Amino acid sequence: MGNRSEDRAGGIRRLPRNVWAASAASFFMDISSEMVLNLLPLFLSSVLGVQTTFIGLIEGVGEATSSLLRIVSGLLSDRFGSRKWLAVSGYAISAVMKPVFYVANTWLTVAGARWGDRVGKGIRTAPRDALIADSIDKERRGLAFGFHRAADTAGAMLGILGALLAVWLTQGSASHLQAHTFRMIVLISLVPAFVAVLALAVGAREVVLKRSGDPSLSFRRLGRPFGFFLVLVAIFELGNSADAFLVLRAQSLGASVLGILGMLAAFNLVYSVISAPVGALSDRIPRRALIVGGWFAYAALYVGIGVTRVGWSMWLFYLLYGSYYGAAYGTTRAFVADLVPAELRGTAYGAYATVVGVLSLPASLVAGVFWDRFGPASPFLFDGGLAFLAALGLLLWRPPLAKSA
Protein backbone atom coordinates (compact mmCIF):
# COMPACT_ATOMS: atom_id res chain seq x y z
CA MET A 1 0.00 0.00 0.00
CA GLY A 2 2.85 2.40 0.81
CA ASN A 3 4.45 1.98 -2.61
CA ARG A 4 1.20 2.64 -4.40
CA SER A 5 0.66 5.84 -2.41
CA GLU A 6 4.20 6.97 -3.18
CA ASP A 7 3.78 6.18 -6.89
CA ARG A 8 0.56 8.17 -7.01
CA ALA A 9 2.12 11.11 -5.18
CA GLY A 10 5.11 11.02 -7.51
CA GLY A 11 2.79 10.88 -10.49
CA ILE A 12 0.98 14.00 -9.29
CA ARG A 13 4.26 15.86 -8.78
CA ARG A 14 5.28 15.00 -12.35
CA LEU A 15 2.09 16.33 -13.89
CA PRO A 16 2.77 19.04 -16.51
CA ARG A 17 2.78 22.76 -15.73
CA ASN A 18 -0.50 23.33 -17.59
CA VAL A 19 -2.34 20.78 -15.45
CA TRP A 20 -1.12 22.54 -12.31
CA ALA A 21 -2.03 25.99 -13.67
CA ALA A 22 -5.53 24.91 -14.74
CA SER A 23 -6.03 23.16 -11.41
CA ALA A 24 -4.91 26.26 -9.49
CA ALA A 25 -7.31 28.45 -11.47
CA SER A 26 -10.19 26.09 -10.77
CA PHE A 27 -9.18 25.85 -7.10
CA PHE A 28 -9.34 29.61 -6.51
CA MET A 29 -12.42 30.22 -8.66
CA ASP A 30 -14.30 27.51 -6.80
CA ILE A 31 -13.38 29.05 -3.45
CA SER A 32 -15.04 32.22 -4.72
CA SER A 33 -18.02 30.66 -6.47
CA GLU A 34 -18.97 28.15 -3.79
CA MET A 35 -18.97 30.84 -1.12
CA VAL A 36 -21.69 32.64 -3.06
CA LEU A 37 -23.58 30.27 -5.34
CA ASN A 38 -24.56 27.67 -2.74
CA LEU A 39 -26.25 30.41 -0.73
CA LEU A 40 -27.89 31.95 -3.78
CA PRO A 41 -31.09 29.81 -3.70
CA LEU A 42 -31.45 30.64 0.01
CA PHE A 43 -30.94 34.35 -0.72
CA LEU A 44 -33.56 34.20 -3.47
CA SER A 45 -36.11 32.29 -1.39
CA SER A 46 -35.54 33.70 2.11
CA VAL A 47 -34.52 37.32 1.36
CA LEU A 48 -36.17 38.11 -1.98
CA GLY A 49 -39.16 35.74 -1.63
CA VAL A 50 -38.71 34.09 -5.04
CA GLN A 51 -40.74 30.95 -5.80
CA THR A 52 -39.00 27.63 -6.42
CA THR A 53 -40.08 27.57 -10.07
CA PHE A 54 -38.28 30.86 -10.72
CA ILE A 55 -35.19 29.63 -8.88
CA GLY A 56 -35.17 26.66 -11.24
CA LEU A 57 -35.59 29.08 -14.17
CA ILE A 58 -32.60 31.19 -13.08
CA GLU A 59 -30.39 28.14 -12.63
CA GLY A 60 -31.53 26.49 -15.85
CA VAL A 61 -31.25 29.56 -18.06
CA GLY A 62 -27.84 30.29 -16.59
CA GLU A 63 -26.56 26.86 -17.61
CA ALA A 64 -28.24 27.08 -21.02
CA THR A 65 -26.61 30.47 -21.63
CA SER A 66 -23.28 28.97 -20.68
CA SER A 67 -23.75 25.99 -22.96
CA LEU A 68 -24.41 28.07 -26.06
CA LEU A 69 -20.92 29.51 -25.70
CA ARG A 70 -19.12 26.27 -24.88
CA ILE A 71 -19.41 24.78 -28.33
CA VAL A 72 -18.36 28.07 -29.96
CA SER A 73 -15.41 28.39 -27.62
CA GLY A 74 -14.38 24.79 -28.26
CA LEU A 75 -14.59 25.24 -32.03
CA LEU A 76 -12.52 28.41 -31.91
CA SER A 77 -9.86 26.77 -29.76
CA ASP A 78 -9.54 23.98 -32.37
CA ARG A 79 -9.52 26.34 -35.33
CA PHE A 80 -6.95 28.80 -34.01
CA GLY A 81 -5.01 26.49 -31.69
CA SER A 82 -5.48 28.85 -28.75
CA ARG A 83 -6.71 27.21 -25.57
CA LYS A 84 -5.14 29.38 -22.89
CA TRP A 85 -6.46 32.87 -23.60
CA LEU A 86 -10.03 31.76 -24.24
CA ALA A 87 -9.95 30.04 -20.86
CA VAL A 88 -8.39 33.09 -19.17
CA SER A 89 -11.07 35.39 -20.61
CA GLY A 90 -13.79 33.08 -19.29
CA TYR A 91 -12.35 33.17 -15.79
CA ALA A 92 -12.07 36.97 -16.00
CA ILE A 93 -15.75 37.39 -16.97
CA SER A 94 -16.88 35.26 -14.03
CA ALA A 95 -14.67 37.29 -11.70
CA VAL A 96 -16.11 40.67 -12.74
CA MET A 97 -19.68 39.37 -12.30
CA LYS A 98 -19.21 38.69 -8.59
CA PRO A 99 -19.65 42.30 -7.41
CA VAL A 100 -23.10 42.43 -9.04
CA PHE A 101 -24.39 39.97 -6.44
CA TYR A 102 -23.43 42.48 -3.74
CA VAL A 103 -25.73 45.20 -5.10
CA ALA A 104 -28.58 42.90 -6.21
CA ASN A 105 -31.97 43.75 -4.69
CA THR A 106 -34.26 42.01 -7.22
CA TRP A 107 -34.39 38.53 -8.69
CA LEU A 108 -33.75 39.98 -12.15
CA THR A 109 -30.44 41.50 -11.02
CA VAL A 110 -29.46 38.22 -9.41
CA ALA A 111 -30.42 36.40 -12.60
CA GLY A 112 -28.31 38.77 -14.69
CA ALA A 113 -25.26 38.23 -12.49
CA ARG A 114 -25.82 34.48 -12.44
CA TRP A 115 -26.14 34.37 -16.23
CA GLY A 116 -23.04 36.53 -16.65
CA ASP A 117 -21.09 34.20 -14.40
CA ARG A 118 -22.26 31.26 -16.54
CA VAL A 119 -21.14 33.08 -19.71
CA GLY A 120 -17.63 33.08 -18.26
CA LYS A 121 -17.87 29.40 -17.45
CA GLY A 122 -19.14 28.68 -20.96
CA ILE A 123 -16.16 30.41 -22.55
CA ARG A 124 -13.51 28.76 -20.37
CA THR A 125 -14.67 25.16 -19.93
CA ALA A 126 -13.93 23.52 -23.29
CA PRO A 127 -10.57 25.25 -23.95
CA ARG A 128 -9.40 24.52 -20.40
CA ASP A 129 -10.30 20.82 -20.61
CA ALA A 130 -8.72 20.57 -24.06
CA LEU A 131 -5.57 22.28 -22.72
CA ILE A 132 -5.33 19.63 -20.00
CA ALA A 133 -5.86 16.80 -22.51
CA ASP A 134 -3.28 18.30 -24.91
CA SER A 135 -0.71 18.54 -22.13
CA ILE A 136 -0.78 14.91 -20.92
CA ASP A 137 -0.23 11.48 -22.45
CA LYS A 138 -3.08 8.96 -22.67
CA GLU A 139 -1.58 6.75 -19.95
CA ARG A 140 -1.89 9.53 -17.34
CA ARG A 141 -5.01 11.26 -18.68
CA GLY A 142 -7.29 9.93 -15.95
CA LEU A 143 -4.87 11.06 -13.25
CA ALA A 144 -4.61 14.54 -14.77
CA PHE A 145 -8.37 15.06 -14.91
CA GLY A 146 -8.81 13.45 -11.50
CA PHE A 147 -6.23 15.81 -10.01
CA HIS A 148 -7.91 18.78 -11.66
CA ARG A 149 -11.28 17.76 -10.21
CA ALA A 150 -9.66 17.23 -6.79
CA ALA A 151 -8.18 20.74 -6.84
CA ASP A 152 -11.45 22.22 -8.08
CA THR A 153 -13.39 20.49 -5.35
CA ALA A 154 -10.88 21.28 -2.61
CA GLY A 155 -11.45 24.92 -3.49
CA ALA A 156 -15.19 24.37 -3.31
CA MET A 157 -14.84 22.83 0.14
CA LEU A 158 -12.76 25.76 1.41
CA GLY A 159 -15.27 28.20 -0.06
CA ILE A 160 -18.12 26.47 1.71
CA LEU A 161 -16.22 26.34 4.99
CA GLY A 162 -15.49 30.05 4.62
CA ALA A 163 -19.18 30.75 4.04
CA LEU A 164 -20.09 28.54 7.00
CA LEU A 165 -17.74 30.49 9.27
CA ALA A 166 -19.12 33.81 8.04
CA VAL A 167 -22.72 32.67 8.63
CA TRP A 168 -21.89 31.41 12.10
CA LEU A 169 -20.14 34.65 13.08
CA THR A 170 -22.88 36.95 11.73
CA GLN A 171 -26.18 35.16 12.31
CA GLY A 172 -25.47 32.02 14.33
CA SER A 173 -27.78 29.05 13.82
CA ALA A 174 -30.67 31.03 12.32
CA SER A 175 -32.75 28.91 9.95
CA HIS A 176 -32.98 31.57 7.21
CA LEU A 177 -30.19 33.43 5.46
CA GLN A 178 -29.99 37.17 6.15
CA ALA A 179 -29.19 39.75 3.48
CA HIS A 180 -26.21 41.37 5.22
CA THR A 181 -24.58 37.95 5.69
CA PHE A 182 -24.87 37.12 2.00
CA ARG A 183 -23.41 40.47 0.91
CA MET A 184 -20.46 40.21 3.26
CA ILE A 185 -19.65 36.77 1.82
CA VAL A 186 -19.81 38.18 -1.71
CA LEU A 187 -17.19 40.79 -0.81
CA ILE A 188 -14.83 38.16 0.60
CA SER A 189 -15.25 36.03 -2.54
CA LEU A 190 -13.77 38.71 -4.81
CA VAL A 191 -10.16 38.00 -3.77
CA PRO A 192 -9.90 34.33 -4.83
CA ALA A 193 -11.88 35.06 -8.01
CA PHE A 194 -9.20 37.41 -9.34
CA VAL A 195 -6.36 35.20 -8.09
CA ALA A 196 -7.83 32.44 -10.28
CA VAL A 197 -7.51 34.63 -13.36
CA LEU A 198 -3.87 35.37 -12.58
CA ALA A 199 -3.05 31.72 -11.91
CA LEU A 200 -4.01 30.63 -15.42
CA ALA A 201 -2.75 33.77 -17.19
CA VAL A 202 0.71 33.52 -15.64
CA GLY A 203 1.05 29.77 -15.14
CA ALA A 204 -0.23 28.15 -18.33
CA ARG A 205 1.42 27.85 -21.74
CA GLU A 206 -0.12 27.08 -25.12
CA VAL A 207 0.41 23.59 -26.53
CA VAL A 208 1.04 23.61 -30.29
CA LEU A 209 -0.82 20.83 -32.13
CA LYS A 210 -1.71 20.35 -35.78
CA ARG A 211 -5.23 21.64 -36.43
CA SER A 212 -7.59 20.93 -39.28
CA GLY A 213 -8.53 24.63 -39.46
CA ASP A 214 -12.00 23.74 -40.76
CA PRO A 215 -14.67 23.90 -38.05
CA SER A 216 -17.43 23.03 -40.56
CA LEU A 217 -16.08 19.47 -40.68
CA SER A 218 -15.47 19.07 -36.98
CA PHE A 219 -18.89 17.77 -35.93
CA ARG A 220 -18.95 15.02 -38.54
CA ARG A 221 -15.40 14.01 -37.74
CA LEU A 222 -16.20 13.55 -34.08
CA GLY A 223 -17.65 10.18 -35.07
CA ARG A 224 -20.61 7.99 -34.19
CA PRO A 225 -19.24 6.60 -30.90
CA PHE A 226 -18.93 10.12 -29.50
CA GLY A 227 -22.39 10.99 -30.84
CA PHE A 228 -23.97 7.95 -29.18
CA PHE A 229 -22.22 8.78 -25.92
CA LEU A 230 -23.73 12.27 -26.09
CA VAL A 231 -27.19 10.72 -26.45
CA LEU A 232 -26.65 8.78 -23.23
CA VAL A 233 -25.30 11.91 -21.55
CA ALA A 234 -28.42 13.78 -22.68
CA ILE A 235 -30.72 11.19 -21.07
CA PHE A 236 -28.74 11.43 -17.84
CA GLU A 237 -28.67 15.23 -17.85
CA LEU A 238 -32.44 15.47 -18.29
CA GLY A 239 -32.55 13.98 -14.81
CA ASN A 240 -29.73 16.12 -13.43
CA SER A 241 -31.50 19.21 -12.10
CA ALA A 242 -29.59 22.04 -10.45
CA ASP A 243 -27.98 21.31 -7.09
CA ALA A 244 -30.05 24.18 -5.72
CA PHE A 245 -32.84 21.62 -5.30
CA LEU A 246 -30.65 19.56 -2.97
CA VAL A 247 -30.16 22.65 -0.83
CA LEU A 248 -33.90 23.34 -0.80
CA ARG A 249 -34.64 19.67 -0.04
CA ALA A 250 -32.33 19.75 2.97
CA GLN A 251 -34.02 22.93 4.19
CA SER A 252 -37.47 21.33 3.73
CA LEU A 253 -36.35 18.51 6.05
CA GLY A 254 -35.39 20.99 8.77
CA ALA A 255 -31.72 21.73 8.09
CA SER A 256 -30.40 25.14 9.15
CA VAL A 257 -28.15 27.31 6.99
CA LEU A 258 -25.14 26.10 8.99
CA GLY A 259 -26.26 22.50 8.60
CA ILE A 260 -26.63 22.88 4.83
CA LEU A 261 -23.17 24.42 4.52
CA GLY A 262 -21.77 21.56 6.61
CA MET A 263 -23.36 19.01 4.27
CA LEU A 264 -21.90 20.80 1.25
CA ALA A 265 -18.46 20.82 2.86
CA ALA A 266 -18.71 17.08 3.53
CA PHE A 267 -19.75 16.49 -0.09
CA ASN A 268 -16.76 18.40 -1.40
CA LEU A 269 -14.37 16.69 1.00
CA VAL A 270 -15.35 13.25 -0.29
CA TYR A 271 -15.32 14.47 -3.89
CA SER A 272 -11.85 15.99 -3.52
CA VAL A 273 -10.28 13.05 -1.68
CA ILE A 274 -11.33 10.34 -4.14
CA SER A 275 -11.08 12.19 -7.48
CA ALA A 276 -7.35 11.75 -8.09
CA PRO A 277 -7.14 8.10 -6.95
CA VAL A 278 -10.19 7.16 -9.01
CA GLY A 279 -8.81 9.11 -11.96
CA ALA A 280 -5.59 7.12 -11.71
CA LEU A 281 -7.64 3.92 -11.44
CA SER A 282 -9.40 4.83 -14.70
CA ASP A 283 -5.99 4.70 -16.42
CA ARG A 284 -5.80 0.99 -15.50
CA ILE A 285 -9.38 -0.22 -15.91
CA PRO A 286 -12.08 0.80 -18.45
CA ARG A 287 -13.24 4.34 -17.73
CA ARG A 288 -16.71 3.39 -18.91
CA ALA A 289 -17.09 0.99 -15.96
CA LEU A 290 -16.46 3.78 -13.47
CA ILE A 291 -18.94 6.08 -15.22
CA VAL A 292 -21.59 3.33 -15.25
CA GLY A 293 -21.09 2.76 -11.53
CA GLY A 294 -21.31 6.48 -10.85
CA TRP A 295 -24.54 6.86 -12.81
CA PHE A 296 -26.19 3.90 -11.06
CA ALA A 297 -25.12 5.35 -7.70
CA TYR A 298 -26.63 8.71 -8.68
CA ALA A 299 -29.94 7.02 -9.54
CA ALA A 300 -30.06 5.23 -6.19
CA LEU A 301 -29.19 8.24 -4.07
CA TYR A 302 -31.69 10.52 -5.82
CA VAL A 303 -34.48 8.02 -5.18
CA GLY A 304 -33.30 7.93 -1.58
CA ILE A 305 -33.42 11.72 -1.32
CA GLY A 306 -36.95 11.62 -2.68
CA VAL A 307 -38.29 9.08 -0.21
CA THR A 308 -36.44 10.14 2.96
CA ARG A 309 -38.39 11.77 5.75
CA VAL A 310 -35.57 12.48 8.23
CA GLY A 311 -33.23 15.43 8.04
CA TRP A 312 -30.06 13.66 9.21
CA SER A 313 -30.18 11.34 6.17
CA MET A 314 -29.23 14.27 3.94
CA TRP A 315 -25.73 14.09 5.44
CA LEU A 316 -25.43 10.52 4.16
CA PHE A 317 -26.83 11.45 0.76
CA TYR A 318 -24.40 14.33 0.37
CA LEU A 319 -21.50 11.97 1.15
CA LEU A 320 -22.77 9.53 -1.49
CA TYR A 321 -23.21 12.41 -3.91
CA GLY A 322 -19.56 13.30 -3.41
CA SER A 323 -18.64 9.68 -4.18
CA TYR A 324 -20.61 9.83 -7.42
CA TYR A 325 -18.84 12.99 -8.54
CA GLY A 326 -15.41 11.67 -7.56
CA ALA A 327 -15.94 8.45 -9.50
CA ALA A 328 -17.65 9.77 -12.63
CA TYR A 329 -17.12 13.48 -13.22
CA GLY A 330 -13.41 13.74 -14.02
CA THR A 331 -13.45 10.24 -15.54
CA THR A 332 -16.10 11.33 -18.02
CA ARG A 333 -13.88 14.15 -19.23
CA ALA A 334 -10.98 11.75 -19.74
CA PHE A 335 -13.35 9.39 -21.59
CA VAL A 336 -14.31 12.17 -24.01
CA ALA A 337 -10.66 12.50 -25.04
CA ASP A 338 -10.53 8.70 -25.55
CA LEU A 339 -13.34 8.87 -28.12
CA VAL A 340 -12.14 11.63 -30.47
CA PRO A 341 -9.01 12.63 -32.44
CA ALA A 342 -6.59 14.96 -30.66
CA GLU A 343 -7.14 17.89 -33.05
CA LEU A 344 -10.90 17.89 -32.28
CA ARG A 345 -10.75 17.85 -28.50
CA GLY A 346 -11.86 21.46 -28.13
CA THR A 347 -14.92 20.79 -30.28
CA ALA A 348 -15.66 17.55 -28.43
CA TYR A 349 -15.44 19.18 -25.01
CA GLY A 350 -17.57 22.06 -26.27
CA ALA A 351 -20.21 19.66 -27.59
CA TYR A 352 -20.21 17.65 -24.37
CA ALA A 353 -20.46 20.76 -22.20
CA THR A 354 -23.19 22.17 -24.44
CA VAL A 355 -25.36 19.08 -24.04
CA VAL A 356 -24.88 19.19 -20.29
CA GLY A 357 -25.63 22.92 -20.12
CA VAL A 358 -28.58 23.08 -22.52
CA LEU A 359 -30.39 20.25 -20.76
CA SER A 360 -29.90 21.91 -17.39
CA LEU A 361 -32.68 24.34 -18.33
CA PRO A 362 -35.46 21.79 -18.94
CA ALA A 363 -34.14 19.58 -16.14
CA SER A 364 -34.30 22.43 -13.62
CA LEU A 365 -37.61 23.78 -14.91
CA VAL A 366 -39.23 20.34 -14.71
CA ALA A 367 -37.82 19.85 -11.23
CA GLY A 368 -39.20 23.21 -10.10
CA VAL A 369 -42.65 22.51 -11.52
CA PHE A 370 -42.71 19.00 -10.02
CA TRP A 371 -41.70 20.43 -6.64
CA ASP A 372 -44.42 23.11 -6.64
CA ARG A 373 -47.20 20.83 -7.93
CA PHE A 374 -46.43 17.38 -6.54
CA GLY A 375 -44.18 18.00 -3.55
CA PRO A 376 -40.45 17.96 -2.75
CA ALA A 377 -40.00 14.21 -3.35
CA SER A 378 -41.22 14.13 -6.95
CA PRO A 379 -38.30 15.76 -8.83
CA PHE A 380 -35.78 13.41 -7.20
CA LEU A 381 -37.76 10.29 -8.12
CA PHE A 382 -38.05 11.50 -11.72
CA ASP A 383 -34.34 12.33 -11.92
CA GLY A 384 -33.34 8.97 -10.45
CA GLY A 385 -35.39 7.11 -13.05
CA LEU A 386 -33.72 8.89 -15.98
CA ALA A 387 -30.26 8.32 -14.49
CA PHE A 388 -31.00 4.59 -14.24
CA LEU A 389 -31.96 4.45 -17.93
CA ALA A 390 -28.78 6.26 -18.99
CA ALA A 391 -26.60 4.01 -16.82
CA LEU A 392 -28.22 0.90 -18.27
CA GLY A 393 -27.59 2.15 -21.82
CA LEU A 394 -23.94 2.85 -21.07
CA LEU A 395 -23.56 -0.57 -19.44
CA LEU A 396 -24.80 -2.35 -22.59
CA TRP A 397 -22.73 -0.23 -25.03
CA ARG A 398 -19.32 -1.34 -26.31
CA PRO A 399 -17.63 1.75 -27.77
CA PRO A 400 -14.56 1.73 -30.02
CA LEU A 401 -11.92 4.32 -29.07
CA ALA A 402 -10.27 6.85 -31.35
CA LYS A 403 -6.94 5.63 -32.82
CA SER A 404 -5.28 8.96 -32.12
CA ALA A 405 -6.67 9.33 -28.61
Image (spheres, helix red, strand yellow):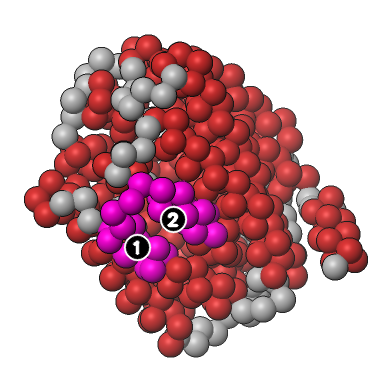
Residue 332, percent across and down? 53, 65
| Res. 227 image quadrant | bottom left
Going by the numbered disc 1, the residue's amino acid type is: Gly
If the image is split into quadrants, where does the C terminus sit? bottom right
Residue nearest the viewer, comparing 28 with 135? 28
Residue 254, percent across and down? 31, 39
Magenta part mainly helix, strand or loop? helix
Above or below, 378 against 167 in this view is below
Among the two numbered marks 2 and 1 on one chain, the one whose residue lies closer to the N terminus: 1
Mark yes or no: residue 52 visible. yes
Mark yes or no: residue 91 visible. no
Going by the numbered disc 2, the residue's amino acid type is: Phe
The residue that disc 2 covers is 317
Q: Is residue 310 magenta?
A: yes
| Res. 8 image quadrant | bottom right
If the image is split into quadrants, where does the N terminus sit? bottom right
The residue that disc 1 covers is 304
For the residues labelled 2 and 1, say whether their Cβ atoms are less than 8 Å apart.
yes
Above or below, 55 against 140 in this view is above
Q: Secondary structure at mark 2?
A: helix
Q: Is residue 380 magenta?
A: no
**Residue range corresponding to the magenta coloring:** 298-323
Taking the spot 80% from the left edge, 54% from the top edge, the residue there is 12
Q: What whole-number distance in Å separates the C-alpha atoms at marks 2 and 1? A: 8 Å
Taking the spot 63% from the left edge, 41% from the top edge, the residue there is 154
Q: Secondary structure at mark 1?
A: helix
Residue 158, percent across and down? 60, 33
